[in-house]
Amino acid sequence: GGPRVTRPSHVTGRRKKVDRLRNPERWSCCCTRDCGMAGIKALVGLSFTGVIGLTFLMLGCALENYGVYWPLFVLIFYAICPIPHLIAKRLSDDTDAASSACMELAYFITTGIVVSAFGFPIILARVEVIEWGACGLVLAGNAVIFLTVLGFFLLFGRGDDFSWEQW
């Protein structure tokens, strides 16, 4: 061998694809984008953070000092949070537009749901139904869960080859 010649990425990419089709055992999971491992790793990571958020919520309810399960009603907010976005994405006519009235309304409703989920434990603590320590744990759980939902839509809601629809 002489000096190694570098080729443009579109040429080497095409050759990799052809070689991958001819010799699949040689290319087993070397390219995470093509075999879906990146999507699976992201999904596992999001699941892990979701479990951490639910753990905070359960600690706010079940610790011996607190022992009140009223904060579990924030699970309703977790369940309905993505619904406006999913409906608006389904009904949106112009996907190329930067913004539409339907999507803006969905963002507004989702923001109201998220703010309500953060306000609910604070109201419960103010009227002394739960203690402030439980409120803090529930608020920490809220932050983690809603960041997980946001991460899910940022990673899988783009409509490219890693869309959430494949799951």
Image: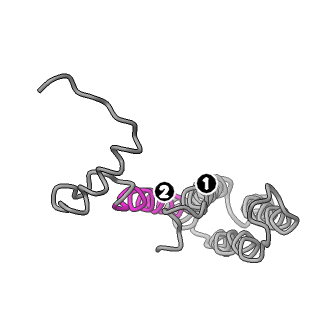
Q: Secondary structure at mark 2?
A: helix
54 left or right, relative to 93: left
Left or right of residue 33: residue 137? right
Q: Whole-percent x and y of residue 68?
A: 61, 70
- Residue 141 on image: x %, y %: 59, 57
Placement of 4 over or under 37, stated as above or below: above
Instruction: Please give the name of the residue rendered at 64% of the width and 74% of the height, measured from the top-left corner.
Output: 79
Instruction: Check disc 2 and report the residue beneath it.
Output: 49
Q: Position of residue 144 (x, y in %)?
A: 58, 54
Disc 1: which residue: 147
| Quarter of the picture holding the N terminus | top left
- Based on the displayed image, in which of its 4 quarters is residue 120 positioned? bottom right
Badge 1 or badge 2: first in the primary sequence: 2
- What residue appears at the point 23 percent right and 55 percent down from the top-left corner? 19
Range of magenta residues: 35-54
Q: Nearer the viewer, residue 152 or 50?
A: 152
Q: Position of residue 165 (x, y in %)?
A: 53, 73
Going by the numbered disc 1, the residue's amino acid type is: Leu
